[in-house]
Image: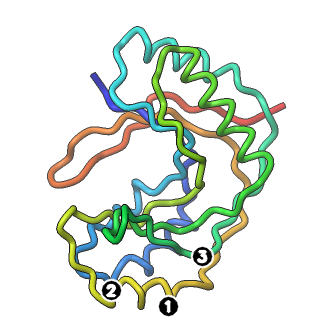
Amino acid sequence: MPRLFAALPVPDEIADALAPLQNGVPQAHWVPVENLHITLAFMGNVEGATQRDLVDELGDIAGPPFAVRLSGVEAFSSGKRPIALVAKVERGERLDWLQRKVATVARNCGVSLERRAFRPHVTLARFADDAETGHHLAQFLASHALFSAGPWICEGFALYSSHRAGAGRAYVAEAEYPLTF
């Protein structure tokens, strides 16, 4: 049973701009540049029939391409424990609309999604539960506070599966959906 998520791919030129940020924090597990994306909805483990429904129903989402821009960095945490380092995505009406449409389709197909607020971002690194980042995390955030990349035109999204690959994960686009009107 594959782990699925819907996401916007990050263009190569944006991934190239993000790559230099991926250092300087001990115990950070840096995301390979080929895996960088903006998650619209994480669906978790999905059975075959539901996956087929998702593939079909996501294809009914129609809307125009829109601009996406990265601006700043942030650390996601649980209490004082860091979970991830991310590049923040500027909020926009079209991005929020697409995220809501994808989440609605997933729920209508029987997928149970987490009910947390959408915080668009590109995950740069993850941390183990026992990570000791010390002052390095604060230095990273201060050094890259003014980071920006883009804008670029998002011309579509994809349904990805996530598979174990060595110590990390590999993402495979199971279906791609162009944004056209």
How many numbered marks appear?
Answer: 3
Question: What kind of residue is marked 1?
Answer: Ser
Q: Name the residue at 46% across, 37% down.
A: 42
Between 46 and 60, the one lying in front of the other is 46
Give the crowd class for mark 2: few <14, some 14-19, many >=20 residues within 10 Å: few
Give the crowd class for mark 1: few <14, some 14-19, many >=20 residues within 10 Å: few
Q: Give the quadrant of residue 158.
A: top right
Nearer-N-terminus badge (3/1) = 3
Disc 1: which residue: 143
Residue 24: mark: 2
Residue 72: mark: 3
Residue 113 lies, with reference to residue 136, above or below; the image says above
Question: Tags 1 and 2 in contact by the CB under 8 Å rule?
Answer: yes
Q: Quadrant of the C terminus?
A: top right
Question: What kind of residue is marked 3?
Answer: Gly
Residue that protrudes farthest toward the right in the picture = 181
Residue 142 lies, with reference to residue 171, above or below; the image says below
Question: Tags 3 and 1 in contact by the CB under 8 Å rule?
Answer: no
Question: What kind of residue is marked 2?
Answer: Gly
Q: Name the residue at 58% across, 66% down.
A: 88
Between 165 and 141, the one lying in front of the other is 141
Residue that protrudes farthest toward the top in the picture = 49
Q: Where is residue 38 drawn, in percent x and y?
A: 54, 52
Residue 28 lies, with reference to residue 163, above or below; the image says below
Q: Name the residue at 27% across, 72% down.
A: 28
Residue 109 lies, with reference to residue 96, above or below; the image says above
Q: Where is residue 10 drawn, in percent x and y?
A: 55, 56
Residues under labels 3 and 1: Cα distance? 10 Å
Give the crowd class for mark 3: few <14, some 14-19, many >=20 residues within 10 Å: some
Helix, strand or loop at label 2? It is loop
